[in-house]
Structure formats: C-alpha cells, structure tokens
Image (cartoon, helix red, strand yellow):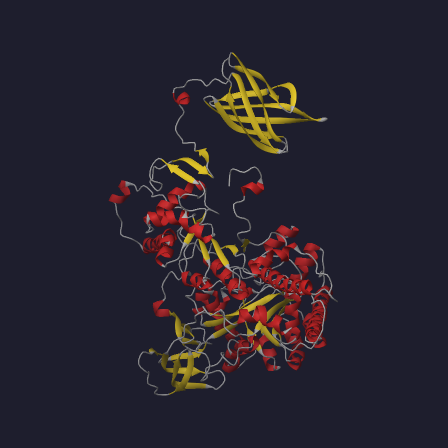
C-alpha cells in the first residue's frame, strides 16, 4: 500500500525539481500592522527575509539589498485568502460521471490567467482553485499562490498545501446526472447514496490492498494484487484523513446529511461551501468541527438558494464555526475586503472577526494556517497593503506581496498585464460587458456538456 | 512510405513511439484535460502493476491466477521498459508543461510533437531530455492594410485609444516574432530538433520555413531539421537523412534552391521510385484554346482490394458528344459508359458493374495529360481507387 500511496499524488505534491519559486527580501516601514491573531500594531515595521516574515517591530533597519516600502499612514494586513475560486484553471468540470475523484484541477492550473493579477489587485494572495459542482464527488482541487508572472503551473501551486476535494449536494449534481442523463443521482437521496457507496467501495478497496500488502510480506505468499483504481484510491485517502472535503451545499437538511455520512465513516476534515442555510445548523457544524465558507450577501440564483440571510457569516461565527467569506467569482475576488465588511453591517462582527473571515479562517479551511493567514514571525510573507482601513468603503489596495515579492503595485500598474498574447487576436475598441452576477460559477464548462449530452439548457 | 504493396510494406520502422495527446474525448470520460491526465496516470499505474504480475506469473505459476490479457495496458509495457518513447502532441506552452509534469511523475522517455510555443520552456525540455519536433505551423501573418493616402495627409494627433491600440498591436507583433523565431531560439539553445507537419497546411510549409529562416534560422539548420535531425531523433540515421551510398533513395529535386521563394519541387523519389510533381503551369492545349481530344482507345489499370483491374476504354466523339464502352479483365462484357463529360482536360463518366446479383454504379474521373491519364474510380460505398492509363497507338 505504501508503495502505491507514495506513487502518484504524493509525487505530484512534492513540486518537481524544476519548479523554482522566487522569494524576496523586503522591509515594510511604519504601517499600521493588522496581525489578525495578535492585534493591531501602530507605526510598526515588518521585515521579510527570503520570503518569510523574520521580524515585526519598530525602527527596524533594512539590511543592504532589501527593498523598502514606506507604509506610513497605510494598513498592512495578511494577504487575503479565497477558499472558493475557479480562477487560474483551464478547465473546471469533469462532468461526465457522478464520481470523478480521480481527477485533479492541479493538472489544469493556468498561471497566465489574468484574473490572478486582478485578484492580486484586490489584495488576494492565495485562492483555492476548485473543481466544479457538476458531480456529487468532483475532482481534487489545488491551492494556488498568486505568484503572477510565471508561466509555470508548478510555481503557481502552493507547495505542500494539503490535498482537498470538491463534493456537491443538491440541484447541480442532480440536474447534470439525474435530470440530464437519467442516472443516479436524480434526487438528494441519490446524492447521499453516491457518496455512501463511494466511501463503502473505497473502504473495501483499501482493505483489499492492506490485506494483499500484509500477506505479500509473508514467506511463500502467492496471490493476485487488487486492481488499481485512481478513483477509489482518492476516496480511500479521504477516509484516511489525507484529504479535506470541500462540499458545495445550500440546504440545512443536506448539510446535516453529509455530517451524518462523514460521522459514519469517521471523516473529520470537512468544509461546507456556499452553505446558505448554515445558520440553521450552526451549533451542529461547530460541534462536529466542520467549517463553513459562505457568500456575504448573495442568493436567490436558483431555487435551493432562496432561504438565505446576510447574517449567515455572523451567526456561524458567533456559534463557533470557523467561517470564511469566498468569491467563487473572478470579479468578486477583487473586493473580498468589502464582502467581509458587510458582516459588520449584518451581524456587527468586530474588525478582527470580519478580517479573520478572509485571512486566517480560510487558511484553516485549506489546512495552511500554520504558514499563512496572519502576520507573525516565521510565517510566509503574503501581505496586502491598503490605503485606509481594509474594512472601510473608501479603502484602496496599494501593494500586494507574495513570498516577499511585490506582485501588485498600484503605482506601477501597467495597462496590459497579459503574459502571453495571441498574435492573431483582433485589437478593437473596448466594449463594456455587463457583468451578470446571478449564479454561482461552479457549473462553468458543464453547461456545454449538458447541452451536448442531454439537450438541456 | 508511399510505394508499398500493402500496409505492412509501407512501414519503414514499426512501433517507433507510443502516441498520446491531451485532447479530451467528446461526451464521455475523460472530457477534460484533468480527466485525460488522470486517465493516463491510472493506466500507467495499472500497466506497471499488471506487467509486474505477469513477470511473477511467468517465473512461477504455482498458486497464481492467470493474468488477464489487456491490450490497452500491454501497449504501455514497452514505454514502462523505456524501449519506446511516448510521442506527445504538445502545441501550447501549458500543454508542453503538463506533458513534462506527467513525464516527471511517471518517468517515461518523451518525444514532444508539434511544439508551437516552446521558447520559454527550453530548459525544462532539456532537463527532461525530451526529443523535440517543432511545428511547421505558424500563426498567419496579417496582410498589410493599404493605407489611404488622404488619411495619411490629414494626420490627427493620437488619442489615448490610438496609443493603447498601438501598444496592443506591438505586443501582438512581439509575440508573432517569438513564434517565427522559435526554431532559431531552439537552435541557439543547442537543442537538436526536427519538424512536425501534424497541424501545418502543406501549402503553408514552404512559406513558413522561409519565415523561420528570416527570423534567424540558417538555411543549413532548417535543412538539417528537415533531414538529418529527424533521422537521428528517430534512430534511423543509418538509412535516412543524407544522400550517401547504401542509404534509401528518398530524394527531393527542385528547380531552384529548396528555400528559394520561387522554388518548385519537380521530382520526388521515395525508395527509388519517382513521383513527378505537377507544376502549376498552364498546359499548352489549354493555353491555346486547343480542344483536348479524348476519342480513341485507352488502356487503363486500377488498384482495387481484389487486385489490379485492367481493361480498355473506347471513346467515340460524335460532333462533341462522346459515347463509348469499357471492358474489364474481371468480366468479358463490354459495358456502355454513361454521363461522359469532358471539361478542359478533365474526363468523367460512369458505368454499371454487376457484382453477383447487385449492380454497382462506378464513377470515374480522370485528368488527361497528352497520351496518358490519371484519376480515380469510385465504386459505390466500397471506396475510391486510383486509376491510370495510356492511349493505345493508332486509331
């Protein structure tokens, strides 16, 4: 078993030798440092050495060769983390089967997606590049660091970040497979069945391999190995606690359903996404240790998303659920600080609580909170510098730093930030497209499949 | 090879590589690049395991289940043994890197085919020791718009929009230059590359080669990439790539140096067999408006799956209206030809052929060239077969 485990995905997680991540040295002088975990520090400097925060204090002198940023009058906070996004990906939905646990968005990372730069322009340094919600068990996801400027997907991946996987409940998976293709799941019961069946099969698969590997070591053993199965292999890793489930969900009943399923199979690492009715089951979520990543005030884009409230994040937070606010959108990702500020109007969260929703909490949900999400010595230097308090309506993101390197600087923000240019593209006068913000983006790419496969629109 | 009695005869060197591409399937799994890569990894892993098991079984069958035969997995065995490289079509810079990631994870020997955007990943390609075939396809060059002289005279001060457009056009031009300079960039990096015609239109190949040469590749380097380099990369240098005693007689003869703008290929030899190239020069008959005459007796032969079919075509010209008969060595009967039409030097007709109880309509279209013709014969739904013939003397 060990051999198999160490083979594919573990190898992929250890970045190949040729993935060269650049890290910088830098001193940010005299800002209001919002540490998130240890309060605010006025007129304070942050020293960054080799991509990591090496010192936070007053009157730090920059060693030679260090870039110095004067942050006088500005707010210095940890880079914003988006726990639900689809930017930086060439493809999102492998929608062909109800369970595609074997696929991985890490294979489709597009480091040249200009949305990554736009996210940087909103102070966002890390996003969770998720598989879509076309299937009950979608693909594995990738946590990316916004090291925009590279053409190397391996550089964009956050090395060593825990594995995550997308699950989806409710209307999307039942529409694509049940309604569209007349296979399970057609109903919410069907979704539960798909998940339970997958867990049970993976358990048997795991046991079969364990038995084979145990017997293999014995003298004179003659036997046939089980058939390797990428899908079951992945699900088995969930059962072992090696993969965090991020589950697209809206309704309280199905959220509670997945809690029970996970309990039955001993799965602890569980984050609910969207989770608009999370406020109804907040104590249950808190008790289980399940987390929630929500929209600030976005709903009614399909039937199952009507029972919603802008107080959702505040209620979840006050009930002790580790909660984040996500974008699920290449536009919304640019102003997650506004989205977080909404929880002060709806629910009266403190500055610290509101900012935790877009920093340390999403870091916890992605299992990277020991490395990022707050400004502390030893943590990675992912930093957003704002003119004005980041929760103010009038705030302006000025500089965004990833691994100690300035990746966005408002003063040096060139018009054309594309990395590769299509020489055949027609250059025309700009036109304004109305941005229709009326659905979640989790089914991106699946519509085509649905139309082609099933004649649905 | 073109000249071969059968498919097997056409093969110069079998199983040179294991072809793969990241293009997804339609409507079924894997329908995306993530599906394709997951499937590739899974098959590779399954093949490694089943190969190991087969080895174990072969060494001692006692107490072991007979391994199942699986031709998909077995196809991977030479790849796993590194006896055969994976030839991966990888055009775009992201695809090239995805393929290199697969190679890095699984460890197979790699050949990259139809590379179009490789200039920024040369070091990775080198590190992976991947044999490389650059695409002969290039983004089309924009035709210069003829500027109105009047508009030029009334030059207005440039607006912000104009400046922005100019900047965007400049970036496009910069990237165009990277595409055309790709072969020279690879050359300078010391990579031995061949070319790939996979997605190139044949009519664009000479002009694309000239664009690549204009962008820094020398003619000698271009020629090497068309001959000695691919021969070396495919391990066929003992037979191909140079003109030398004992090598295969694969020759191209052009009327000007090959890379000259007006060069035309006149003759091609494949394994010693001459293929005359049709050069687009108006035939005398056409030019002078002289009518081409098709009447007379012609001997033809066609290559069909049943073998070579030969016979006679007899054509009469009755005041511009043709009629005639056709015979075949497969039946003795003379068959009446129908719908005979002569348009310039193109002759077409059809006839009915009895196959047992069925009658099949056969359509023939031929191009006449003096006393010979070439063309094809379409036999219902059975396919189309080449046909050639010569005029019989006399009559």
Percent across and percent down for residue B229 are 41, 51
State how many labels appear.
0
Of residues A102 and A444, the one drawn nearer to the viewer in this rendering: A102
Residue occupying image coordinates x 44% and y 43% = B246
Of residues A261 and B200, the one drawn nearer to the viewer in this rendering: B200
Residue lying at the far right of the rendered structure? B63
**Quarter holding residue A142:** bottom right
Of residues A446 and B188, the one drawn nearer to the viewer in this rendering: B188
Percent across and percent down for residue B113 are 48, 53
Residue B294 can be seen in this image = yes
Residue occupying image coordinates x 58% and y 39% = B6
Percent across and percent down for residue A224 are 71, 67
Of residues B246 and B55, the one drawn nearer to the viewer in this rendering: B246
Residue lying at the far bottom of the rendered structure? A58
Residue lying at the far top of the rendered structure? B319
Residue lying at the far front of the rendered structure? B245
Residue A298 can be seen in this image = no
Task: Classify A297 as above or below B268.
Answer: below
Percent across and percent down for residue B89 are 50, 53
Task: Classify B73 as above or below B312.
Answer: below
């Amino acid at each position: 078993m060990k051999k198999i485990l160490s083979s594919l995905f573990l190898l992929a997680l250890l970045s190949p030798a040729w993935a060269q991540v650049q890290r910088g040295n830098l001193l940010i002088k005299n800002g209001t440092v919002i540490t998130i975990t240890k309060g605010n520090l006025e007129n304070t400097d942050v020293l960054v050495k080799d991509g990591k925060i090496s010192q936070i204090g007053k009157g730090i002198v920059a060693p030679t060769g260090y870039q110095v940023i004067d942050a006088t009058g500005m707010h210095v906070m940890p880079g914003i983390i988006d726990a639900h996004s689809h930017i930086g990906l060439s493809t999102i939905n492998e929608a062909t089967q109800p369970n595609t646990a074997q696929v991985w968005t890490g294979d489709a990372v597009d480091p040249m997606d200009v949305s990554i730069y736009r996210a940087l322009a909103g102070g966002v340094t890390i996003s969770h590049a998720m598989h879509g919600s076309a299937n009950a068990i979608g693909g594995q996801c990738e946590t990316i660091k916004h090291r925009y400027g590279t053409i190397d997907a391996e550089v964009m991946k956050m090395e060593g970040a825990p594995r995550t996987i997308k699950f989806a409940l409710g209307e999307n998976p039942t529409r694509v497979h049940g309604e569209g293709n007349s296979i399970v799941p057609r109903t919410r019961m069907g979704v539960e069945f798909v998940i339970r069946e997958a867990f049970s099969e993976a358990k048997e698969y795991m046991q079969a391999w364990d038995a084979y590997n145990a017997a293999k070591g014995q003298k004179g053993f003659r036997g046939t190995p089980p058939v390797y199965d990428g899908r079951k292999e992945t699900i088995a890793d969930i059962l072992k606690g090696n993969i965090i489930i991020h589950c697209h969900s809206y309704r309280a009943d199905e959220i509670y359903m997945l809690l029970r399923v996970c309990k039955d199979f001993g799965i602890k690492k569980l984050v609910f996404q969207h989770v608009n009715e999370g406020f109804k089951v907040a104590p249950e979520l808190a008790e289980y240790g399940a987390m929630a990543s929500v929209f600030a005030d976005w709903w009614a884009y399909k039937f199952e998303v009507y029972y919603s409230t802008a107080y959702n994040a505040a209620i979840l937070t006050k009930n002790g659920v580790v909660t984040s606010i996500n974008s699920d959108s290449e536009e919304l990702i640019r102003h997650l600080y506004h989205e977080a500020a909404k929880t002060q109007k709806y629910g009266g969260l403190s500055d610290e609580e509101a900012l935790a929703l877009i920093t340390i909490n999403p870091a916890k949900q992605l299992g990277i909170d020991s490395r990022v999400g707050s400004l502390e010595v030893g943590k990675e230097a992912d930093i957003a510098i704002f003119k004005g308090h980041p929760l103010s309506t009038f705030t302006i993101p000025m500089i965004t730093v990833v691994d100690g390197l300035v990746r966005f600087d408002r003063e040096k923000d060139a018009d054309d930030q594309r990395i590769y240019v299509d020489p055949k593209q027609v250059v025309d006068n700009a036109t304004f497209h109305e941005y229709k913000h009326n659905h979640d983006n989790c089914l991106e790419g699946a519509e085509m499949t649905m139309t082609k496969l099933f004649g649905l629109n | 090879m073109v000249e071969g009695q059968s498919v097997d005869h056409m093969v110069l060197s079998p199983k040179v590589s294991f072809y793969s591409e990241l293009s997804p399937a339609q409507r079924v799994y894997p329908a995306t690049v993530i599906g394709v890569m997951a499937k590739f990894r899974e098959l590779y892993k399954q093949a490694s395991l089943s190969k190991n098991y087969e080895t174990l079984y072969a060494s001692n069958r006692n107490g072991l289940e007979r391994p199942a035969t699986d031709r998909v997995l077995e196809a991977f065995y030479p790849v796993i043994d590194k006896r055969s490289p994976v030839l991966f079509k990888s055009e775009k810079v992201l695809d090239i890197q995805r393929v290199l990631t697969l190679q890095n994870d699984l460890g197979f020997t790699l050949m990259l085919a139809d590379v179009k955007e490789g200039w920024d990943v040369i070091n990775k390609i080198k590190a992976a020791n991947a044999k490389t075939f650059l695409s002969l396809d290039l983004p089309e060059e924009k035709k210069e718009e003829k500027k109105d002289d009047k508009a030029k005279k009334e030059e207005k001060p440039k607006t912000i929009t104009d400046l922005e457009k100019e900047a965007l056009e400049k970036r496009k031009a910069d990237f165009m230059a990277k595409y055309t300079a790709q072969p020279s960039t690879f050359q300078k990096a010391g990579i031995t590359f061949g070319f790939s015609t996979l997605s190139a239109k044949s009519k664009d190949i000479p002009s694309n080669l000239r664009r690549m040469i204009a962008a820094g590749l020398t003619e000698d380097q271009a020629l090497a990439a068309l001959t000695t380099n691919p021969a070396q990369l495919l391990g066929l240098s003992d037979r191909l790539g140079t003109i030398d005693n004992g090598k295969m007689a694969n020759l191209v003869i052009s009327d000007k140096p090959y890379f000259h703008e007006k060069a035309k290929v006149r003759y091609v030899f494949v394994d010693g067999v001459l293929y005359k190239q049709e050069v687009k020069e108006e035939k005398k008959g056409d030019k002078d408006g002289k009518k081409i005459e098709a009447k007379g007796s012609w001997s033809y032969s066609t290559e069909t799956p049943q073998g070579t079919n030969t016979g006679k075509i007899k054509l009469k010209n009755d005041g511009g209206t043709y009629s005639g008969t056709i015979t075949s060595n497969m039946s003795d009967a003379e068959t009446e030809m129908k719908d005979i039409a002569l348009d310039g030097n193109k002759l077409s007709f059809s006839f009915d052929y009895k196959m047992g109880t069925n009658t099949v309509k056969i359509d023939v279209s031929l191009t006449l060239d003096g006393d010979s013709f070439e063309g094809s014969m379409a036999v219902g739904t059975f396919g189309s077969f080449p046909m050639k013939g010569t005029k019989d003397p006399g009559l």
